[in-house]
Image (cartoon, rainbow, N blue to C red):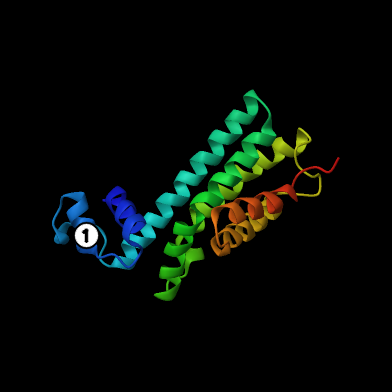
């Protein structure tokens, strides 16, 4: 059901109906509501799952950094996060609008993500690809800013350039 919800919300936005999710999942609406008593509960589950996927992606990037250059692994991960951030932000905004404390909802997985990013950041910093004065907290803050900047860009060229400029601020200066 989560895969179906993800697909429906990605295609139709977070305002899509739970009936559309049920149809996509090939189940009745009652089945959806047995697992997720409210639409907000379904949105929460999708958001948490998306965060879990980011944790796995960060861990995979850290493993890739073990075998090669940690710089491209870190910056590739950051670019991936920014590229999919608009839909994640839409979930978070919809939940906040419904009075849900998003920080509480993603609490555990947020900690896992911060830990995975910290490993990746440490490897990149130790390899000289990242400024020495930058830690995981700063990288996450820059990532949030880059994600919001990407949402406001009028076209893809401007978006890509703005994100590159922002992320370049993390690189070690020559």
Residue 64 versus residue 11: which sits nearer the camera?
Answer: 11
Residue 140 versus residue 109: which sits nearer the camera?
Answer: 140
- Image spot of residue 160 (x, y percent): 60, 50
Q: Residue furthest right?
A: 174
- Image spot of residue 158 (x, y percent): 61, 56
Q: Is residue 133 left or right of residue 51?
A: right
**For mark 1, what is the residue?**
20
Q: Is residue 57 left or right of residue 9?
A: right
The residue located at (68%, 51%) in the rendering is 139
Give the quarter of the image for residue 22. bottom left
Residue 52, above or below 28: above
Badge 1 crowding class, 10 Å Cα cut-off, few under 14, some 14 to 19, many 20 or more, is: some
- Image spot of residue 134 (x, y percent): 76, 49
The residue located at (71%, 37%) in the rendering is 124
**SS at circle 1:** helix
The residue located at (59%, 55%) in the rendering is 159
Residue 70, above or below 146: above
């Amino acid at each position: 059901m989560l895969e179906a919800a993800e697909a429906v919300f990605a295609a139709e936005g977070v305002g899509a109906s739970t009936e559309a999710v049920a149809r996509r999942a090939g189940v009745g609406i009652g089945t959806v509501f047995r697992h997720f008593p409210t639409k907000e509960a379904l949105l929460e589950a999708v958001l948490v799952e998306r965060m879990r996927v980011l944790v796995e992606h960060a861990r995979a990037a850290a493993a890739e950094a073990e075998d090669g250059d940690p710089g491209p692994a870190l910056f590739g991960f950051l670019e991936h996060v920014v590229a999919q951030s608009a839909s994640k932000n839409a979930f978070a905004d919809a939940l906040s609008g419904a009075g849900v404390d998003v920080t509480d909802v993603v609490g555990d997985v947020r900690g896992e993500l911060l830990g995975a990013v910290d490993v990746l950041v440490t490897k990149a910093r130790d390899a000289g690809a990242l400024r020495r004065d930058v830690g995981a907290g700063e990288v996450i803050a820059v990532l949030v800013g880059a994600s919001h900047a990407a949402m406001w860009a009028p076209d893809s060229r401007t978006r890509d350039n703005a994100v590159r400029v922002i992320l370049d601020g993390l690189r070690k200066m020559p």
